[in-house]
Image: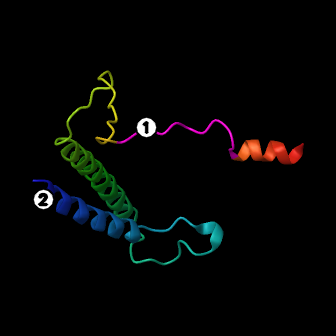
Amino acid sequence: MSTVVLVIHLLLAIALVGVILLQRSEGGALGIGGGSGFLTARGTANLLTRTTAILAGIFFLTSMALAWMAGIDRKPASILGAPATQSQPVGATPVAPPTSGGVLDTLKKVDE
């Protein structure tokens, strides 16, 4: 089921990019937009705007569906449960942290 939704999601993404690229540019300040395009009618702009909004809405829904499907198999973990304990291998002796002779102690001796 998630594969079908993923394929629909990818097709929607491609269609959304295509519809956005067909729209008229509003970059008049840069001198690259407007002018004579093959889709200059006002009705075509409304159609492309509505199509973009519909595709974006469906894209959003498929994104949420994919996120929901990805989370179905996850099992909830309790944050109130007992912490995991680390066990040492049999026969291992615990190692105590050094109390002196570290880097800071060496630097203190150099400063003195």
Left or right of 102: which side holds 11?
A: left
Q: Which residues are magenta?
A: 92-102
Q: Residue furthest right?
A: 112
* Circle 2 or circle 1, nearest the eye: 1
Q: Main secondary structure of the magenta part?
A: loop
**Label number found at residue 4:** 2
Q: Measure the alpha-carbon separation of dots 2 and 1.
A: 54 Å
**In the image, residue 12 above or below residue 22:** above
**Dot 2: few (<14), some (14–19), or many (≥20) neighbours within 10 Å?**
few
Q: Residue furthest top?
A: 80
Of 45 and 92, nearer the camera is 92
Secondary structure of the residue carrying tag 1 is loop
Which amino acid does the dot numbered 1 rest on? Pro
Q: Residue furthest left?
A: 1
Instruction: Specify the quadrant that holds the C terminus.
Output: top right
Of 6 and 83, nearer the camera is 83
Where is residue 78? Give x, y as percent: 28, 26
Left or right of 29: which side holds 68?
A: left
Where is residue 69? Give x, y as percent: 18, 46
Query: Is residue 98 located in the magenta-colored stretch of the structure?
Result: yes
Residue 111, image quadrant: top right
Which residue sits at x=85%, y=48%?
110
Which residue sits at x=27%, y=50%?
63
Which residue sits at x=34%, y=27%?
83
Residue 46, image quadrant: bottom left
**Dot 1: few (<14), some (14–19), or many (≥20) neighbours within 10 Å?**
few
Of 107 and 98, nearer the camera is 98
Where is residue 55? Give x, y as percent: 28, 56
Q: Which residue is mark 1?
A: 94
Query: Is residue 25 located in the magenta-colored stretch of the structure?
Result: no
**In the image, residue 55 above or below residue 99:** below
Where is residue 92? Give x, y as percent: 36, 42
